[in-house]
């Protein structure tokens, strides 16, 4: 006896029509029929009264279905407890193409599961697929669908880019700007921002960039000197008090990152609770 056979039997009982049950189970009707017949042989009883084009669950079948549901519920409960144990005792390794969505994911995760252990890294964006395939990480935050039969990606959250502009700059009079408006400008930037660092230079190649690798130094400079600087609604710098600056959205298509969560398909069951929760809650963050 296999659990899949019990699930098949319960599905047939619920759908009441073999063809609908087969469609729901993604199996051919003859294969489903053979599987149930093997289960009947093992029990030594017939579950259905079979007539032309019709199968009706009999008393023996109803008894087996009732007990099968109990078994399957117990198995599902066991899997949930095991997955919870894994999440609490084993770290979830996350690679991200940008820091802000990972910060947000991590912060929200530990509020609902304080014992969860999360480790993160921000490799080059092109390396993330190989890290997943080599099982060096369990979860990834990426911008693009990954074309691999072994990897599944689901929509996660968006990040919109803004520019904080000193009120003395003419751009502060605008309600929205484009990358082209920043041509020739001097822009101060923290370098630990993942793919954004490269994207800024691709979109505004003739700007002058003043770079900071130390985040504390960077925040002190932008608070005291009020330079042009990039921020996002997810990034912590958006909330730094800068009374003499105006925050203006950049409306080019490239200024919005559409993130996806990626993981190995074989780990889907283990990560399902976290992925489902994160994708549902992300729109509220």
Image (cartoon, rainbow, N blue to C red):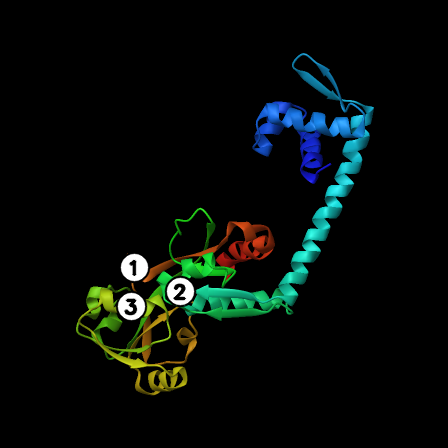
Q: Which residue is mark 2?
A: 97
In the rendering, at what x and y percent does residue 76 appear? 70, 48
Q: For the point 68% across and 54% down, which residue is it?
A: 80
Residue at the spot of label 1: 254
Residue 171 x/y as whole percent: 23, 71
Where is residue 255, by image quadrant? bottom left
- Figure quadrant of residue 259: bottom left
The answer to which of marks 1 and 2 sits earlier in the sequence is 2
Local crowd at mark 3 within 10 Å, few (<14), some, or many (≥20)? Answer: few
Where disc 3 sits, the SS reads: helix
Badge 3 is on which residue? Answer: 198
Q: Is residue 70 left or right of residue 22?
A: right
Name the element at disc 2.
Answer: loop
Which of discs 1 and 2 lies nearer the camera? The answer is 2
Q: Are marks 1 and 2 in contact (CB under 8 Å)?
A: no
The structure residue drawn at horizontal position 42% and vertical position 69%, both measured from the top left corner, is: 122
Instruction: Say left or right for 16 vs 181.
Output: right
* Count of all numbered marks drawn on residues in the image: 3
92 lies above or below 13: below
Distance of label 1 from label 2 (alpha carbons): 15 Å
Dot 1 falls on a residue whose secondary structure is helix
């Amino acid at each position: 006896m296999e659990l899949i056979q019990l699930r098949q039997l319960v599905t047939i009982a619920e759908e009441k029509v073999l063809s609908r049950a087969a469609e729901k189970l993604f199996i051919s009707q003859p294969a489903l029929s053979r599987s149930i017949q093997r289960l009947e042989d093992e029990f030594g009883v017939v579950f259905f009264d079979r007539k032309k084009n019709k199968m009706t669950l009999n008393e023996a079948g109803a008894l087996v279905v009732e007990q099968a549901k109990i078994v399957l519920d117990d198995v599902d409960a066991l899997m949930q407890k095991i997955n919870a144990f894994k999440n609490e005792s084993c770290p979830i390794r996350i690679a991200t193409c940008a820091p802000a969505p990972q910060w947000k994911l991590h912060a929200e995760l530990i509020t609902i599961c304080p014992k969860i252990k999360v480790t993160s890294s921000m490799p080059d964006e092109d390396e993330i697929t190989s890290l997943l395939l080599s099982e060096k990480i369990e979860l990834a935050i990426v911008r693009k669908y990954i074309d691999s039969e072994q990897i599944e990606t689901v929509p996660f959250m968006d990040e919109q880019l803004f520019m904080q502009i000193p009120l003395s700059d003419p751009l502060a009079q605008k309600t929205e700007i484009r990358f082209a408006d920043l041509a020739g400008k001097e822009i101060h930037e923290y370098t630990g921002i993942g793919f954004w660092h490269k994207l800024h230079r691709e979109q505004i190649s003739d700007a002058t960039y003043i770079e900071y690798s130390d985040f504390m130094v960077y925040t002190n400079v932008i608070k005291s000197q009020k330079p042009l600087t990039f921020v996002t609604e997810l990034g912590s710098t958006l909330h730094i008090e800068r009374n003499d600056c105006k925050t203006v959205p950049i409306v080019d298509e490239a200024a919005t990152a559409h993130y996806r969560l990626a993981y190995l398909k074989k780990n889907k069951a283990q990560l399902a609770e976290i992925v489902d929760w994160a994708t549902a809650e992300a729109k509220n963050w």
